[in-house]
Image (cartoon, rainbow, N blue to C red):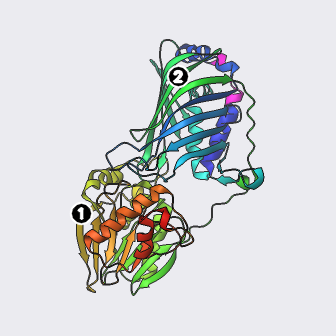
Amino acid sequence: MRRYIALAVFGFVLAATSLSAQQGVLQKAADTLKVSTIKTLQVTGSGANFSVGQNYTASEPWPRVTVKNYTSVINYDTGSMRTDLVRESGAVMPKGGGAPFFGEQRQTQLVSGNYAWNLGAPGPNGAAPMAAPAPDAVPERMLFIWTTPIGFVKGAMANNATTKGSTVSFTAGGKYKVEGTINKQGQVEKVRTWFDQPIVGDMLVETTYSGYKDFGGVTYPSHIVQTQDGYPALDITVSAVTANPAVNIDVPQNVRNFQPPPIRVESQKMADGVYYLTGTSHHSLAIDMGDYIAVVDTPLTQARGEAVLAKAKELIPGKPIRYVITSHHHWDHLGGIRAAMDEGATILTHQSNKAFLERVAKTPHTIAPDRLASSKKGVKIQTVGDDYKLTGGNNRVIELHRLQGYEHTGDMTVVYLPNEKLLAEPDAFTPPAQAGAPLIPPAVVYAKALNDNIKRLKLDVQVITPLHGNRTTTVAELEKAAAGPATN
């Protein structure tokens, strides 16, 4: 929470800073962008955003989603921002991951000082949309404000920036490094910053601004491209800019009062020594292999990963966690992988992920150090091909199979226990909360791919434990979903 407070104070300081305090390249930018006259800003455009952490393979760009309408309003004095997006998808999502949707999808993302939240769709009879707290988004959204061209200049002037040639650098909120390039015309061309990401550590966010033009008296770039971890995350062509519109963003009371719930790992015994670990949106599996434990997936965050590993050892006491199996490389399922590395477990992953996980093991975590950053333990990574068998001292067998013809990710590995006739899979089929409820078209495509692979591999599956959702399911329900909405 301390880092959020620092960022909020940063916003307050900017409002009180005199532009005349700086000279040279920074003052040139302040004059060009008319920083002293702009307290609020509205930017409108269209283009694309990208599903960060959800690429098809670990070495490919993030999947692209069309943004039909983009509107962002910023109040620099209060450190607050609202971004409204209208995204568009066809019947099949882009190759790679990301939450599936069909047609148009509206998103509203807000931040103000210490608080971040999202707005859902309006309720019945025009009721106001519900605010969903998003505290983990505070650093990224606040840094977005201060890496806009005007925000960057304001931030540099408020935080004793250093200038070397055309490069200007300062520290925001006491821990976030921000550096930018200003050209001879006083235009901010590029801004770089870093924030903590559980898997890749101090993640570089780089925003490039080009095509500056006069938007009704406001000099602003007509093209904005942001990359995260080296791949495009946002690409917007600006159509309109308005200076000093009314921007009053009030933090909803439920957002102010929100306290993150304690991490809870619940367990369901699927067979002797086989446990389905739930309690959140992403699930895991703990398997007693006789003389050791194997865990499938450490999702979401380092803290969640640590809790999953602790629960596995509680349920299967007196045995080490020798293997942690990664279902695939998507960040939401890999968030606790460094906790598994620090545990000393061998990471069992598809061979296409070797280079990525080697980088994950070594990447700097200076903004928010984790246990591995402190212990500096050696990391063991074992790669597998499309099919692999793991055996234990109790004669239990774990089969790993990579899904073929699956557009969500190229390395999706499902886990099959032939003795128990149990299949664990993430993302391919998440049954609706109520059996028989309809599925949107993208989910049907993924269900069909899983069903086809079960038949191809001749797996005798009695129970499916999805690594999403709130219940187990059967092949019969999967087959019904794979056939399409008409049979649901």
Residue 319 is labelled as: none
**What is the x, y in percent for residue 23?**
58, 14
Disc marking residue 386: 1
152 sits left or right of 113 in the view: left
Badge 2 density bin: few <14, some 14–19, many ≥20, Cα 10 Å: many
Q: Is residue 439 above or below residue 91?
A: below
Q: Amino acid at mark 1?
A: Asp
Residue sitting at x 51%, y 62%: 439
Is 463 a magenta residue?
no
Q: Is residue 395 above or below residue 434?
A: below
Nearest the eye: 8 or 236: 236
Q: Position of residue 174 (x, y in %)?
A: 57, 40
Distance from the alpha carbon under mark 2 to that under mark 1 = 46 Å
Magenta span of residues: 14-21
Count of numbered marks: 2
Comes first in the chain, label 2 or label 1 = 2
| Most common secondary structure along the magenta stretch | helix
Badge 2 vs badge 1, beta-carbon distance below 8 Å: no
Callout 2 amino acid: Ser
Nearest the camera: 30 or 16?
A: 30
Task: Give residue 222's mark.
Answer: 2
